Image: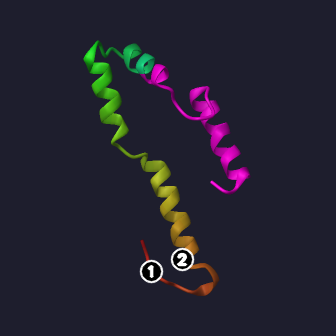
Amino acid sequence: MANKTDVRKLQNGDIERYGNPDGPTFEFLYKKYEEIGYQGDEIYQAIIDKASTTNKEYNALMLINANLLLNWGGYTMTKI
């Protein structure tokens, strides 16, 4: 990201949520799934499965922001 302020905001959120400015580590995810009862290969599969899903709240926010940008200045280009 070119905007250092935005990068810092994202890093601060990751620090709050995961204790790491770069998001969750493998160790963090392993411990998370182990604590909720997964065992052995189930832990690895849960990490892989979750990596292919999206964050609905983040996606909704990005969609709102994209539509605001498309409609900026009274011009409507196209909706996403």
22 on left or right of 5: left
Mark 2: secondary structure: helix
Q: Residue at x 67, y 38 (%)?
A: 12
Rendered location of residue 40, percent (x, y): 28, 13
- Relative to 44, residue 1 above or below: below
Pointers 2 and 1 in contact (C-beta within 8 Å): yes
Query: Within the image, what quadrant is residue 70 found in?
Result: bottom right
Query: Within the image, what quadrant is residue 23 found in?
Result: top right
- Relative to 60, residue 68 above or below: below
Disc 1 residue type? Thr
Q: Residue at x 52, y 64 (%)?
A: 64
37 on left or right of 61: left
Rendered location of residue 76, percent (x, y): 51, 84
Range drawn in magenta: 1-29
Disc 2 residue type? Leu
Q: Residue furthest front?
A: 2
The colour scheme is rainbow
Rendered location of residue 17, percent (x, y): 58, 31
User: Which disc, if any, is residue 78?
Assistant: 1
Judging depth in this view, the residue of 38 and 8 nearest the camera is 8
Judging depth in this view, the residue of 62 and 24 nearest the camera is 24
